[in-house]
Image (cartoon, rainbow, N blue to C red):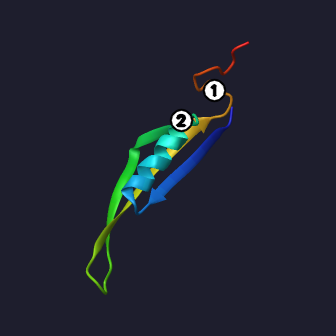
Amino acid sequence: MATEVKIVRDWDSDAFHRRVLQLEAAGFTARRETYTVTPEMNPDTGEVTHLHSIELVRIAGAETGGNVGAS
């Protein structure tokens, strides 16, 4: 079995969480221990933004629920 890994990174927290939910619905599992929120400051404006990041994995050939493997 092969393992597929995706890393989701986004500055917009809503877009980040939507993408993670989409991948989980597609059979990926979020590796919660890899979740980070990194603050960054724009040196010109002083505005602080946050980069959200997480790793998700899917084992190829593993059942993901639903009708997988049903006859």
Local SS, label 2: helix
Q: Judge whether 3 appears above or below 45 on screen.
A: above
Q: Is residue 35 left or right of residue 21?
A: left
- The residue at the point 50 percent across, 53 percent down is 8
The N terminus lies in which quarter of the figure?
top right
Tell me if residue 68 can be seen. yes
Helix, strand or loop at label 1? It is loop
On the image, the x and y values in percent for residue 53 come to 43, 55
Residue nearest the viewer, comparing 14 with 41: 14
Q: Residue furthest bottom?
A: 44
Q: Horizontal and vertical percent for residue 36?
A: 36, 54
Do the residues bearing badges 1 and 2 touch, measured as CB atoms within 8 Å?
Answer: no
The residue shown at (34%, 62%) is 38
Specify whether 37 is left or right of 19: left
21 vs 43, nearest the viewer: 21
CA separation in Å, label 1 and label 2: 14 Å
Numbered tag placed on residue 25 in the rendering: 2
* Type of amino acid under label 2: Ala
Above-or-below relation of 3 to 13: above
Q: Residue 6, percent across and down?
A: 56, 49
Q: Is residue 34 left or right of residue 44?
A: right
Specify the quadrant that holds the C terminus: top right
Q: Which residue appears at 37% of the width and 56% of the height?
A: 13
Which numbered disc, 1 or 2, marks the residue closer to the eye?
2
Mark drawn on residue 62: 1
Q: Which mark is residue 28?
A: none
**Residue farthest along the right direction in this orientation:** 71
